[in-house]
Amino acid sequence: MNLRNIGVVYRKELRDMLRDRRTIINAILIPLLAFPVLLVGFVGVAIFVASRATEKDLKVMILNEAEAPEVAQRIRRELSFVMVQPSEDYVDAINNKRLHLAVEFPAQMEEKIRTAPAEPHTVKLYHFEGQIRSTAAARRVERIVNAYRDEVIAARLESRGLDRGALEPFTFEKENAASADRVTGSILGFLLPYFVILLSLTGAMYPALDLTAGEKERGTMETILASPVHRGDLVAGKFLLTLTFSLVTTSLSIVSLAATVLGGAGLIGQVSKGFVFAVSGTAISAVLFLLLPVTVLFSAGLMAIAVYARNYRDAQNYLAPLMFVVILPAMASMVPGMELNARLALVPILNISLAAREILTGQYQWGLIALIFGSTAAYAAGALVVVARQFNREEVIFRV
Amino acid sequence: MIEALKLCKSFRDKKRGEVHAVQDVSFNCQPGKIYGLLGANGAGKTTTLRLLATILQPTSGTARVAGFDIVQQPQQVRSSVGFLSTATALYGRLTAQEMVEYFGRLNGLDEVTLKARIDGLFSRMDMDEFRTRQCDKLSTGMKQKVSIARTLVNDPPVMIFDEPTVGLDVMTARTIVRFIRECRDAGKTVIFSTHVMSEVEKLCDRVGIIHDGRLLTEGTLDELRQRHGLTDLEDIFVRVVSDGRERRPLGDNQ
């Protein structure tokens, strides 16, 4: 090991990489912007679609208005509704989306409510299950009809001299007892492990490819092999650079995701009624620490595979299936009920996904964390040995 | 100097099975002389030169390059060798100067020596004009100059050229030929491979004809002419190669 030469290789590769626009996009811009863009994109599109879809022009048909003129009148007054003349083909119209909702009142509904209070009635709503505008129209009609029912109930109670309390002996009140960082952690714990593991892989992917298969493709492999640098030092310099990119991508994506969740608290806050969000610095640091051997594993593993490839395209073909091998275990954090245990702690990637989720929600099982770090470090060391061997195999290096 | 001793290189090929790319190749190259390795495509020229440059390891046999053993002391060998071939490309995103600097540093030069060397090389070869331009943006001729500067930055005593003029235009090829002569005049040991007869006649002090991985004959041009009773190198080459083919089964049994 010649540290000076490792440094020379590292600095040269770094300079080379930073001059490539694709590197900057992959290693810095994507991890920084992915989460804010996803959040703004998703929430924005959702709000836009939902509001546009439900704010106006909901086509509603009342099939027999005469049976409930009072309720029908209220439905007509709803601003987002466009009333459609009653006709027999309302089922067809709903199926063809010419109509969003048809309301059918039972015979003499309002009349009987007044004259025969004991008799039950059913208002039928014909809608398109799962269609957003149809559902919105149905919900609004339900609200109008419910308001009318409440008025009927209130009038009946009053005529019997009873109070509203007779129908509602008690109510519920929910209050969040979990601390701000734990609640934020449980949101982060769901998303962060998956995205961060995936981004640390993609962060390493481009340099791993460029420094191995890319070097073969550009014809510089023989140039560098003819120099006095020891192959071990060459691999070490290249590996350290790949690792740097993986770590930068991972750190940036963690910071970006945490900032997005905090920044997006305004949006989420509306849902959770002004709850304050907070991220625990300790938890984030612990997750980063746990990710360290994974980034080593990814960097070395990707290099070992990519150096075997003849060229860039060949390498991409080898690495594409690897994405799936990583994606599946990385999704463990999203599986409810999947708990970390000693056996799962030995499964690479999956173990980190589960442990990161636990850490973010404030659970630290030190024994298992040590086991995960140790086992992943062992896999990473194995991958490093493989990549060093690959660079010494003529049939790999000269496979063109 | 270069001293090849029964160099052998075999590898397994999926389609062809066991391939003997180089078999029992022995020869000597002296300082201040140019040794030409002449052979058709696939004859084993590139493999022989890669073995000498320690890019490949011999299956058996060895060679001493500038006093170092290619099997036991590969790093010292590489420090003593400038290796140039059409396959030794440049890093396109580095500038001409950075490219040469990189190889200077890998050769262990300190920054002061490195700077002096680069300044000297760049001015001698008229390279100052494109010193800070990225290699990707250079013309073929400029690229060749950068490659030459790369091999010379540590002033190695041995130069190995693997078909250095293949695919180059006349002017660039002339630059390379002139450069090879300069290396000889500077007292370096030079070996180069080619299948162009005129290059051998122009440049070489000694010639080795290689075919199917075997060195079939070697000597000075005059020695070869006398030995085979022919004057034209192309005729000698054809004679040696066809004789080699006919004699092969006999030779293998010996």
Image (tube, rainbow, N blue to C red):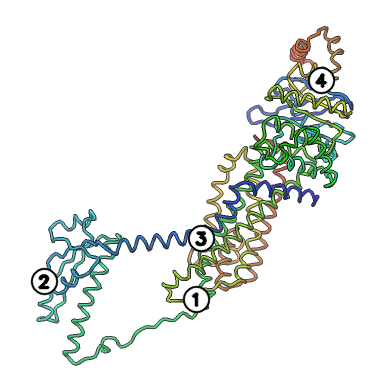
Q: Which of A135 and B205 is in front in this view?
A: B205
Q: Which of marks 2 and 4 is in front?
A: 4
Taking the spot 57% from the left edge, 43% from the top edge, the residue there is: A316
Q: Distance between the residues labelled 3 and 4?
A: 64 Å
Secondary structure at badge 4 equals helix
How many angstroms separate mark 3 from mark 1 (CA)? 20 Å
Q: Kindly identify which residue carries mark 3.
A: A35
User: Please, is residue A30 above or below residue B62 in the view?
Assistant: below
Classed neighbour count for the residue bearing mark 2: other residues with Cα under 10 Å, few (<14), some (14–19), many (≥20): some
Name the kind of residue labelled 4 in the image.
Answer: Leu
Q: Is residue A148 above or below residue B79?
A: below
Residue type at mark 3: give it. Answer: Phe
Q: Distance between the residues labelled 2 and 1?
A: 50 Å
Q: Which amino acid does label 1 sit on?
A: Val
The residue at which mark 4 appears reads as B203
Q: What element carries label 2?
A: helix
Q: Is mark 3 on a helix, strand or loop?
A: helix
